[in-house]
Image: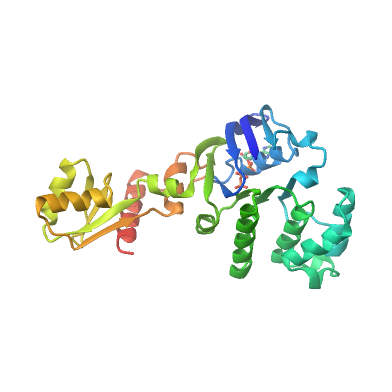
Amino acid sequence: MITARELTKKYGGTTAVNGLSFDIKPGVVTGFLGPNGAGKSTTMRMILGLDAPSGGSVTVNGKAYRDLPAPMREVGALLDAKAVHGARTAYRHLQWVAQAGGISRKRVDEVLDTVGLTEVAGKKVGNFSLGMYQRLGIATALLGDPPTLLFDEPVNGLDPEGIYWIRTLMQDLAAEGRTVFVSSHLMNEMEETAAHVIVIGRGELIADMPMAELTRQSARSHVRVVSPLAGELAGALEKAGGTVTKLDDGSLTVVGMDAPQIGDLALERGLGLHELTPVRASLEAAFMDLTKNSVQYRSSGGAPQQLAETVRALAAEGTD
Ligand SMILES: Nc1ncnc2c1ncn2[C@@H]1O[C@H](COP(=O)(O)OP(=O)(O)OP(=O)(O)O)[C@@H](O)[C@H]1O
């Protein structure tokens, strides 16, 4: 369990993290999302005692990192996979870290096997591909068999097979009852991997909820309705509190009512339905809506362009 309370970090005049409070629970993968510069890496560095908070606190299993008696056995982390001495072999690197943490050689062999690097364990790390660096970083994080794991952008630069492998590993680690906290820019990937999500923007908490809830709550989640009496049905739906948009193909996009409510109302009024399809927003769409006021750098294009993009996105989702 990772517990942050009013966690704050200031660098001179920049507030990187501002009053963050959250609990990261064991047993599920928790995704950590936010636009560039939102404060994700700073938060992870504070959890690991690499940066001191300017205010508030963060603990791992009830203790600040510096107070953990055997930190490697409590928390494992992958922050920067390339922060490894290139002239060392993978085996030497792991052996060196294991020795520093009082961990046996046998465990080095085990983690090499877990990440699939046994065959190249004798090769110099400097010649590794990015994917191999990531695997070595994960092996290092697993050395102490810790109940809490942090991964900062673990799938960066990986091929689909590598991405699938990391996703499965993280889910397996969570299923074993560990706390798994992972940041990523890849929304599709996060949607597949994480069951819970924490979103921050400009250092502040924007959302802390199950993944399914986040996408369900998004204004882009809607119901696509096709009826031969679309005009009449649209009027009835609006009276009942729905927000209805008519698309060019004659279908209706309804926000604010779910499919059973729409179906029941159509039946009551004797209006035929040819299609009734709940369309859940993608995590990417939900994320864009949530963080649109928090991005540090934005490409040009004002409100009219954003509106046009939203309408296009709705139409595209409706015709999937
Ligand atoms: N050592 C530092 N000195 C000064 N400012 C810093 C330092 N580290 C981070 N910052 C600033 O703090 C803010 C948060 O940065 P951080 O790297 O934590 O964000 P992030 O969410 O991890 O971003 P990204 O997704 O781009 O990696 C940014 O404005 C950044 O410029």
Kindly identify the residue that appears in the image at 60 percent across and 60 percent down.
167
Please indicate whether residue 169 sits to the left or right of residue 283 in the image.
right
Residue 15 visible in the snapshot? no
Q: Relative to 279, say whether 35 is above or below.
A: above
On the image, the x and y values in percent for residue 44 come to 67, 42
The quarter of the rendered structure image containing the C terminus is bottom left
Kindly identify the residue that appears in the image at 28 percent across and 49 percent down.
258
The quarter of the rendered structure image containing the N terminus is top right
Q: Residue furthest bottom?
A: 119
Figure quarter occupied by ligand 1:
top right
Please indicate whether residue 279 sits to the left or right of residue 6 in the image.
left
Give the camera-side residue of 154 and 193. Answer: 193
On the image, the x and y values in percent for residue 62 come to 70, 33
On the image, the x and y values in percent for residue 304 come to 32, 46
Q: Relative to 92, say whether 206 is above or below.
A: above
Kindly identify the residue that appears in the image at 60 percent across and 41 percent down.
24
Kindly identify the residue that appears in the image at 64 percent across and 29 percent down.
13
On the image, the x and y values in percent for residue 255 come to 28, 47
Q: Relative to 22, say whether 72 is above or below.
A: below
Q: How many marks?
A: 0
Q: Residue furthest front?
A: 176
Give the camera-side residue of 171 and 166. Answer: 171
Please indicate whether residue 240 sits to the left or right of residue 159 in the image.
left
The structure's colour scheme is: rainbow
Residue 67 visible in the snapshot? yes
Task: Classify residue 68 by image quadrant.
Answer: top right
